[in-house]
């Protein structure tokens, strides 16, 4: 079963890179399929034979920091050579139109991007993006997720496996450079959720202060994108099923998290009460992504597959699987709505959403043999 999970993680990671490679290389050459297949074949072979590449921990650390510097160089190149006005992607425009409206005292969820889309993310998403909007370069926010993730793993190399593949995968994946160039930040917010849940696994239940801090952060970060509720379900429900936590303990966490979540919406409810009930992120997501019945069905499925969690590494794997299939359902539904229109060339599907699962699968691959994560959960 462990090998099946690793293989599944690897296949999905390669698939995500293939989707991006095929879509964007197709714009510059007719050999996009051949190049894309060659790229993921090289990544696969690197995974299979990485043990033949012998490097000391010191040199691996050097390569990690070099990778961070390289990606920072991509940020500067993006800033100098890829202006926002030249982008045909409205991820940055969602942020700028929302904050522009907010700073002018207008209700921000009525704002529209350059492609006419309403802002679907929740308030904390825009609050985190605000400093980067003010300094005029959102690609820094895109870079921060990759930089922090590389730094985090580099500090724990001795506890992790497949480190060389981890590094090679990110440096050779098209979506990494696409996110920075397009000012997308899906990976960044997913990494923040991953860090939070990894912290949760290490917080002693009797440390009330840390539990309260975690719970507030959980509520605040949930107010970025609602899809992250899937990750919370996996970690909290599995903890309950495996008797790691008592119900009253998780109920206490849930209450504080709910308070933190509601807190982010209070300014909108106070100053734009009537407008809020006309247009808000919940109505936008249910109207323009998938119907609520699909969301409810997948939450139920996520709860059921959470029963398969046997150790902490499994929690990251199941989170990745749940995120991947939730986006796959969205993609299939979008293609169905488009009927004859192609998902890549007619923009029926926003393929960037597949990045949601990437941090969880890479973390699973690197941590699945670590003592901190692979040991079977013992009920407390």
Image (tube, grey):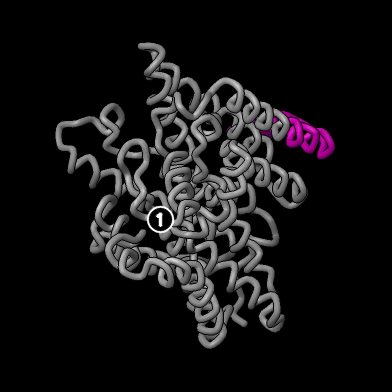
Residue at the (41%, 58%) spot, across then down: 227
The rendered magenta stretch, by its main secondary structure, is classed as helix
Q: Secondary structure at mark 1?
A: loop
Q: 54 or 326: which is nearer to us?
A: 326
Circle 1 sits on which residue?
106
Determine if the magenta segment contains residue 62.
yes
Left or right position of 377 against 276: right
Q: In the rendering, at what x and y percent does residue 231 appear?
A: 48, 62
Q: 10 or 222: which is nearer to us?
A: 222
Magenta segment boundaries in residue numbering:
48-66
Q: In the rendering, at what x and y percent does residue 19 appear?
A: 40, 31
- How would you rate the neighbour count of disc 1 (Cα within 10 Å): few for under 14, some for 14-19, many for 20 or more? some
Residue at the (41%, 71%) spot, across then down: 269
Q: Residue furthest bottom?
A: 248
Q: Quadrant of the C terminus?
A: bottom right
Left or right position of 189 against 93: right
Q: Residue furthest right?
A: 58
Q: Residue furthest left?
A: 340
Q: Residue 66's quadrant in the figure?
A: top right
Determine if the magenta segment contains residue 131.
no
Residue at the (37%, 53%) spot, across then down: 120
Q: From this viewpoint, is residue 11 visible?
A: no
Q: How many marks?
A: 1
Q: 213 or 235: which is nearer to us?
A: 213
Q: Residue furthest top?
A: 30
Q: From this viewpoint, is residue 378 visible?
A: yes
Residue at the (59%, 67%) spot, across then down: 217
Q: In the rendering, at what x and y percent does residue 1 appear?
A: 48, 55
């Amino acid at each position: 079963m462990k090998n099946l999970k690793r293989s599944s993680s690897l296949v999905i990671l390669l698939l995500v890179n293939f989707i991006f490679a095929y879509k964007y290389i197709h714009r510059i050459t007719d050999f996009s399929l051949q190049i894309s297949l060659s790229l993921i074949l090289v990544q696969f072979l690197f995974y299979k034979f990485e043990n033949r590449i012998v490097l000391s921990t010191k040199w691996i650390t050097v390569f990690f920091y070099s990778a961070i510097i390289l990606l920072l160089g991509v940020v500067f190149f993006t800033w100098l050579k890829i202006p926002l006005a030249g982008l045909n992607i409205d991820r940055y425009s969602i942020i700028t139109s929302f904050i522009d409206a907010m700073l002018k005292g207008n209700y921000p969820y009525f704002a529209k991007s350059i492609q006419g889309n309403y802002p679907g993310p929740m308030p904390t998403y825009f609050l985190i993006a605000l400093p980067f909007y003010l300094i005029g370069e959102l690609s820094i926010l895109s870079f921060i997720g990759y930089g922090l993730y590389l730094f985090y793993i580099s500090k724990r190399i001795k506890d992790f496996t497949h480190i060389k593949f981890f590094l090679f995968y990110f440096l050779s994946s098209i979506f990494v450079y696409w996110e920075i160039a397009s000012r997308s930040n899906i990976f960044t917010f997913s990494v923040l959720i991953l860090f939070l849940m990894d912290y949760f696994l290490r917080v002693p239940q009797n440390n009330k202060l840390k539990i309260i801090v975690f719970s507030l952060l959980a509520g605040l970060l949930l107010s970025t994108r609602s899809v992250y509720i899937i990750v919370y379900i996996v970690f909290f429900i599995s903890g309950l099923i495996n008797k790691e936590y008592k119900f009253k303990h998780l109920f206490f966490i849930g209450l504080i998290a709910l308070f933190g979540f509601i807190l982010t919406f209070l300014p909108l409810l106070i100053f734009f009460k009537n407008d809020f009930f006309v247009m808000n992120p919940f109505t936008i997501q249910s109207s323009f992504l998938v119907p609520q019945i699909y969301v409810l069905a997948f939450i139920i499925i996520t709860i059921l597959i959470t029963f398969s969690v046997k150790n902490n590494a499994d929690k990251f794997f199941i989170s990745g699987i749940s995120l991947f299939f939730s986006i796959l359902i969205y993609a299939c539904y979008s293609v169905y709505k488009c009927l004859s229109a192609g998902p890549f060339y007619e923009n029926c599907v926003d393929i960037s959403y597949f990045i949601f699962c990437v941090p969880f699968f890479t973390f699973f691959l690197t941590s699945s043999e670590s003592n901190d994560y692979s040991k079977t959960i013992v009920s407390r």
